[in-house]
Image: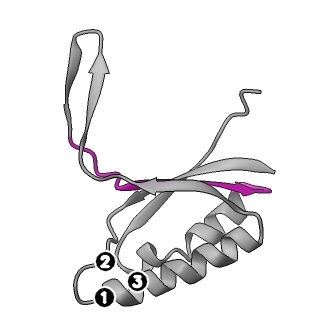
Amino acid sequence: MSQYILLFRGGSPDDSNREEMGAKWGEWLEKAKAQGKYQSGLPFLEDGKQIDSSGSSEYKSDVGAFMIMEHPNIEDALEWAGKLPSISNGGSVSVHEAQDMG
């Protein structure tokens, strides 16, 4: 199994569908955890900061959350990502295989 990092853009619920989206997310996460796919993930609260050789500065990102999952291959990771509730709510998710640093 390899680890994959999912980066979420858009697709956040609004007042009209917050309860429905919350239920869909709960179902999706329950299934992913039960199958040992979900490892961790968190939404971002606000824009961050970035740092380079000239110092730190404000950073406006279009990424709203990340998730780490385990999959046997990129195709399986994409299949799971395609069923995320944020996809059906107009969002997108990029999927990246993580390099094993161990």
Residue 31 x %, y %: 68, 78
The structure residue drawn at horizontal position 24% and vertical position 50%, both measured from the top left corner, is: 46
Instruction: Give the x, y percent position of residue 70.
Output: 72, 55
User: Can you identify the residue that label 2 sits on?
Assistant: 13
What amino acid type should be assigned to the residue bearing mark 2? Pro
Residue type marked 1: Asn
Q: Give percent across and percent down for residue 84.
A: 52, 74
Above or below 15: residue 77: above
Check the image and report above or below for 77 versus 12: above
What range is drawn magenta here?
A: 60-73
Residue 23 drawn at (x, y percent): 47, 86
The three-letter amino acid code for the residue at tag 3 is Met
Residue 17 numbered mark, or none: 1
Separation (CA) of disc 1 from disc 3: 6 Å
Asked whether the residues under the numbered discs 2 and 1 touch, taking CB atoms below 8 Å apart as contact, a structural biologist would say: yes
Determine the secondary structure under disc 2: loop
Q: Residue furthest top?
A: 53
**Separation of marks 2 and 3 at Cα, in angstroms:** 6 Å
Q: Residue 21's quadrant in the figure?
A: bottom left
Of residues 10 and 58, which is closer to you in this image? 58
| Residue 34 visible in rendering | yes
Badge 2 or badge 3: first in the primary sequence: 2
Name the residue located 50 percent from the left edge and 84 percent from the top edge: 24
Classify mark 1: residues with Cα within 10 Å, few (<14), some (14-19) or many (20+).
Answer: few
Q: Which residue is mark 3?
A: 21
| Quarter of the figure with residue 83 | bottom right
Asked if the residue under mark 3 is in contact with the one under mark 1, i.e. CB atoms within 8 Å, the reply is yes
Callout 1: SS = loop
Side of 31 relative to 48 (left or right): right
Where, by quadrant of the figure, is residue 49 drawn?
A: top left
The answer to whether the residue labelled 2 contacts the one labelled 3, judged by CB atoms less than 8 Å apart, is yes
